[in-house]
Image (tube, coloured by chain):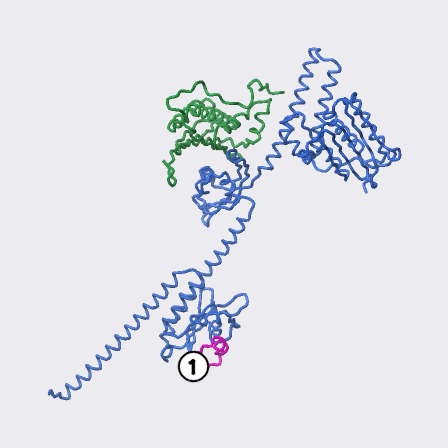
Chain colours: A blue, B green
């Protein structure tokens, strides 16, 4: 047995006290280390996602772990309604709490988000700010709450709360500091996720708009590498069925390489002649950053193939007619100079030139839109008769019978039409008949008053027209397309239609191959 | 040498003053590169003809406003494919589609028929116009079916022209 004296006894007590203190400090230090580690871990987790629902779940899980709480919840301010909206809560009551929306100042969480200050309540039953209905709805019994605001540089965006410390313990100021630190990081992460979400939404909106555009669109980065294209652009360059991916199409690389050298907004044309047959009118807009450096470009491409095709056909027509006219004038001049031509020959060439000039005039009338008619009131009979007589003299109706059928009361019927143009279209119709009626054929011009409408019919017993050609006969474009391939191609039917429509009338063609053709013009007798 | 994925490209370029006197030089440049692909004699003749027409157009249109302008000719070999890019700096857009369409009908004036020939011979043809700045003609010719080994062409290759040379009248006044 060892007996200790008083001094030794005091020293012994002192050592025990110091050891206990060291133990306590070590435990506290270890706890602080764990808390710090948990906080760092939680903050690191916040940076693992930009998906807002996932992020909120992480915040709630980590806040409960960090503060040893039974549950946690988070509410964000809905700017549109100025309400607090429970975005998500950890635990089985997630769905119920998600439905809860509170006026901004309501409840502990409402108070914190309004004031922007933390709140630690040991017994919620003693705090009148406590909002009982959330517990009723969630069937969770809240006893204590630690709630901290979620603050960004622009203000408070909501609040984060942890409920009931586990094992009956109470939340303390240390928990509050930890939760504040987490909330600060969480608020930033929420703001980033929201910004990311809105950027994604904007991007999707832009992509939807671009994809719905009829014009082709190609967006590039600063190196003129493609970053976005729409189906219209892909159809132009991938439509050939080469199977190459859009980015691998070499001619596109060549185009973008050329554009990259321009360095400014530019309009340009592309004619893809082979294997495609496409004409594109394009615009490149260069995108620039704050320092005026190029950050990318947008190339919009409009397919103008059909438009150019129509323009080309018109240009071909006028070129061809002009050439033919100048050629005939040249020949006439040379023949006259050498005294090699008779007066009949001169007349023949002059009529041929006149016909071509008339075609050009008719073409320009059609091109310039609706006709301005020179209407005058008078009997229809003499107009038709005059055209028939002139045609008989002018065209080769010597062998072909040409008759006008018109009852006397119709002959004297007043109409308000452009007399010259009506005569012209009759000439043109009769001229067409000549080409398709054989020597013993017959052409009849009938005039009638049908339901107070003027009806002029030109019928022949010629070779007729094939059924498949009939619908195209009145189409100007169809005739223009054939101008160069057939010397007989004529715009006359299209012009007749143009004149008839200017009178408010319609034209119809009935034909049977081998039996003949009937052109029926129906138009109002008067303007009104 | 440039490569994209598994495709390797050899790029060659020549820059000449936009004048017709360089036409032989340009043709020789293209022919030398085309030989590496081992095109058949007919294909080589066709390529020469195309370069003749395309360069003549570029030199003609590219030097209208300024005599010291250049024509850039780039040849790219990609496997058995020859890509020819001819760029002039006249910046005068025209409608190749119109000229191509009218070529076999047109019996007056000169010009335009080259485009028809180019389109007939080449596998890919594209024009790129930047008004007031440049015109770029992009053409691709792929090597066709190989001839029977050792067999010489029986006669000079015949290019089927869509018109007769007798059809071309003097320009009407």
**In this view, B78 is above or below A99:** above
Quadrant including the C terminus of chain B: top right
In the rendered view, does A363 fall on the left or right side of A393? left
Question: Residue at the left extreme?
Answer: A1
Residue at horizontal 54%, vertical 65%? A80
**In this view, A202 is above or below B49:** below
Asked if the stretch drawn in magenta spans residue A139, the answer is: yes
**In this view, A310 is above or below A89:** above
User: What is the crowding at mark 1: few (fewer than 14 residues within 10 Å), some, or many (at least 20)?
Assistant: some
Q: x and y percent of residue B28 in the render?
A: 41, 24
**Regarding mark 1 in the picture, which secondary structure is present there?**
loop
In the rendered view, does A11 fall on the left or right side of A228? left
Residue where numbered disc 1 is placed: A123
Q: x and y percent of residue A329 in the render?
A: 68, 19
Residue at horizontal 38%, vertical 35%? B9
**In this view, A126 is above or below A443:** below
Q: x and y percent of residue A386 in the render?
A: 83, 27
- In the image, A266 versus A292, the foreground residue is A266
The magenta region covers A122-142
Q: x and y percent of residue B127 in the render?
A: 51, 33
């Amino acid at each position: 047995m060892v007996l200790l004296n008083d001094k030794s006894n005091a020293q012994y007590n002192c050592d025990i006290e110091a050891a206990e203190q060291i133990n306590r400090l070590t435990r506290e230090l270890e706890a602080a280390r764990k808390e710090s580690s948990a906080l760092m871990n939680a903050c690191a987790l916040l940076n693992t996602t930009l998906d807002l629902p996932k992020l909120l779940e992480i915040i709630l899980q980590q806040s409960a772990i960090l503060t040893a709480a039974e549950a946690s919840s988070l509410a964000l301010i809905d700017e549109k309604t100025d309400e607090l909206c429970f975005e998500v809560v950890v635990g089985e009551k997630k769905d119920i709490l998600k439905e809860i929306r509170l006026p901004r100042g309501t409840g502990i969480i409402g108070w914190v988000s309004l004031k922007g200050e933390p709140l630690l309540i040991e017994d919620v039953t003693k705090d009148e700010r406590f909002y009982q209905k959330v517990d009723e709805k969630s069937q969770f019994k809240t006893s204590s709450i630690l709630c901290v605001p979620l603050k960004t540089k622009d203000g408070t965006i909501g609040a984060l709360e942890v409920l009931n410390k586990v094992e009956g313990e109470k939340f303390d100021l240390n928990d509050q500091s930890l939760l504040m630190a987490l909330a600060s990081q969480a608020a930033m992460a929420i703001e980033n996720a929201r910004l990311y979400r809105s950027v994604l939404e904007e991007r999707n909106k832009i992509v939807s708009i671009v994809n719905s555009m009829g014009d082709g669109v190609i967006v590039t980065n600063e190196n003129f590498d493609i970053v976005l294209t729409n189906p219209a652009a892909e159809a132009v360059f991938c439509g050939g069925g080469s199977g190459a991916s859009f980015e691998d199409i070499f001619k596109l690389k060549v185009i973008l390489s050329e554009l990259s050298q321009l360095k400014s907004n530019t309009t340009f044309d592309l004619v893809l002649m082979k294997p495609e047959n496409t004409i594109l009118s394009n615009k490149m807009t260069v995108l620039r950053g704050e320092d005026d450096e190029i950050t990318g470009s947008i190339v919009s491409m409009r397919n103008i193939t059909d438009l150019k095709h129509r323009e080309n056909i018109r240009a071909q027509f006028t070129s061809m007619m002009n050439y033919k006219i100048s050629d005939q004038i040249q020949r006439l001049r040379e023949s006259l100079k050498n005294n090699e031509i008779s007066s009949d020959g001169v007349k023949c060439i002059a009529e041929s030139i006149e016909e071509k000039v008339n075609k050009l005039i008719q073409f320009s009338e059609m091109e310039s839109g609706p006709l301005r008619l020179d209407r005058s009131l008078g009997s229809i009979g003499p107009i038709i008769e005059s055209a028939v007589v002139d045609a008989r003299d002018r065209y080769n109706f010597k062998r072909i019978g040409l008759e006008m059928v018109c009852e006397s009361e119709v002959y004297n019927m007043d109409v308000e039409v452009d007399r010259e143009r009506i005569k012209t279209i009759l000439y043109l119709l009769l001229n067409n008949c000549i080409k398709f009626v054989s020597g013993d054929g017959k052409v009849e011009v009938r005039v009638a008053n049908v339901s107070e409408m003027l009806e002029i019919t030109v019928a022949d017993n010629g070779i007729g027209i094939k059924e498949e050609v009939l619908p195209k006969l009145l189409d100007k474009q169809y005739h223009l397309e054939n101008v160069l391939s057939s010397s007989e191609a004529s715009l006359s039917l299209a012009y007749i239609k143009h004149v008839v429509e200017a009178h408010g009338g319609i034209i119809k063609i009935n034909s049977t191959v081998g039996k003949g053709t009937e052109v029926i013009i129906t138009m109002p007798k008067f303007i009104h | 040498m440039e490569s994209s994925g598994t495709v390797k490209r050899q790029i060659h370029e020549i820059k000449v003053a936009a004048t017709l006197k360089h036409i032989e030089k340009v043709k020789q440049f293209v022919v030398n590169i085309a030989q590496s692909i081992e095109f058949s004699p007919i294909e080589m003749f066709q390529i020469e003809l195309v370069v003749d027409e395309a360069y003549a157009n570029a030199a003609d249109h590219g030097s209208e406003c300024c005599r010291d302008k250049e024509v850039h000719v780039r040849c790219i070999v990609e496997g058995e494919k020859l890509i020819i890019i001819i760029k002039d700096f006249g910046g005068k857009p025209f409608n190749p589609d119109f000229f191509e369409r009218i070529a076999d009908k047109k019996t007056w004036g000169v010009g335009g028929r080259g485009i028809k020939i180019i389109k007939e011979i080449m596998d890919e043809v594209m024009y790129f116009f930047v008004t007031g700045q440049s015109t770029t003609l992009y053409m691709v010719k792929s090597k066709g079916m190989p001839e029977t080994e050792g067999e010489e062409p029986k006669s000079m290759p015949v290019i089927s022209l869509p018109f007769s040379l007798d059809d071309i009248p003097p320009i009407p006044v």
